[in-house]
Amino acid sequence: MADETARLKELRSYHIMGSPPEEELDELAKIASLVCNVPISLISIIGKDHQWPMVNSGLGKGETKRQDSFCQHALNNPKEVLVVQDSTKDFRFKNNPFVIGEPKIRFYAGAPLETPNGNVLGTLCVLDNRPRKISTNHKKALQVLAKKAMDYLNTRKLLLEQNSKIETNISELKKLTDNVPGGIFQLKMDPNGRLNFEFLSSGMKELHPSINFEEWLKFPDLAFSLIHPDDIDAFHNSLMKSLKGVTPLYFEYRVKVNDEYHWHFISAKPQKMADNTVLLYGCFQDITNRVEFENAMEQISFDISHVLRKPVTSLLGLTQLLQDDRVIKKAELLEYVGYIKSVSIELDQFTRDLYAIYNEKRKKLNIDKN
């Protein structure tokens, strides 16, 4: 049946089949026993082929066949309490194995556990081994207790769904942080000024392959020990200024990686918490290639301004001589041409060397980017 298919699908979403008893539900079932003055109370869940007692107070039986359950007859009437005053006189139950045999059920009253979608998961029910009647107020009490049980189950379901989403989001966030270039971190400063890393992404391992991260999380001073001696004071001052002033942090510095120094930058923003701790969220990145490229371009600019000055000055002087009004002899002219040719060769070689240096730096930068 389509309705039964939908009911079973919603039942699975509650994740209660086979779950251990829970104190809140057990208390509701015991209240039902006391209110109705009966020895047995259950919160029973009806699956596809079996009935499972989520709470079992006094019956002493576990999972049973659905076809033998009383509760299955309440599935299609979510607003009514199913009452069986004497099972031996009811054609639906007089041959039931729990009526003929132990525990010799004679009386049953069950209030449906109705979901917000109108499906019935099972019942909150009371049983006795002797026939009896039930008052209207008792029925209302069972319905109130069944509603309280469903409120609990709905809250439980919501919490499970939220936990599942949180776990999924954490997993997805971890994948993102693991693939971000460089390293992501969270640093905490307590009110006494003590520092400790609360999070380091796996990208930090690429920046510092020789570092034990478990030790780094315990002892943040390990990070400072890697910074170049000439940069450590400025780095520490910038960090403290950011944490104490709650201002953004950006600093470029040299850090030891294996046996050589690389250029890194730190970029982060602090947040002051209610307990006066300060959390610093940020990232580290290796900018060695960028710094080397910038240094190379500075050198190229220096070479252009100094190395080219001499040949350019020579060419300007020769040009001035050629522009004079005096008659220039052929031998003198050939000498000027020789100078111009020599300077031109010098300039050509220099531009070739310059291009080779620039091209090599550009290739290295592109390779490292990829």
Image (tube, helix red, strand yellow):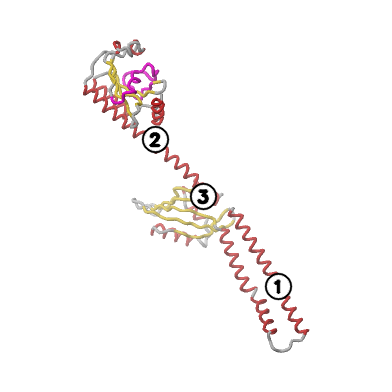
- The circle drawn on residue 160 is 2
Sooner in the amino-acid sequence: mark 3 or mark 2: 2
Residue 8 lies in quadrant: top left
Task: Please tell me whether residue 215 belongs to the stretch shown in magenta.
Answer: no
Is there a contact, CB below 8 Å, between mark 1 and mark 2? Answer: no
**To which residue does mark 3 refer?**
180
Instruction: Calculate the distance from the C-alpha at mark 3 to the C-alpha at mark 1.
Output: 47 Å
Q: Which element carries disc 1, helix, strand or loop? A: helix
* Mark 1: amino acid: Glu
- Disc 2 crowd rating (10 Å Cα; few below 14, some 14-19, many 20+) is some
- Disc 1 crowd rating (10 Å Cα; few below 14, some 14-19, many 20+) is few
**To which residue does mark 1 refer?**
346
Number of labels in the image equals 3
Residue 18 seen in the figure: no
Above or below — where is 105 with respect to 304? above
Sooner in the amino-acid sequence: mark 3 or mark 1: 3
Where's residue 130, x and y in %?
Answer: 27, 13
Instruction: Calculate the distance from the C-alpha at mark 1 to the C-alpha at mark 2.
Output: 77 Å
Q: Which element carries disc 3, helix, strand or loop? A: loop
* Mark 3: amino acid: Val
Q: Quadrant of the N terminus?
A: top left
Instruction: Calculate the distance from the C-alpha at mark 3 to the C-alpha at mark 2.
Output: 30 Å
Is there a contact, CB below 8 Å, between mark 3 and mark 2? Answer: no
Is residue 96 toward the left or the right of residue 196 in the image?
left
Sooner in the amino-acid sequence: mark 1 or mark 2: 2
Above or below — where is 78 with respect to 107? below
Residue 3 seen in the figure: yes
Above or below — where is 14 with respect to 314? above
Q: Give the range drawn in magenta.
A: 51-79
Q: Which element carries disc 2, helix, strand or loop? A: helix
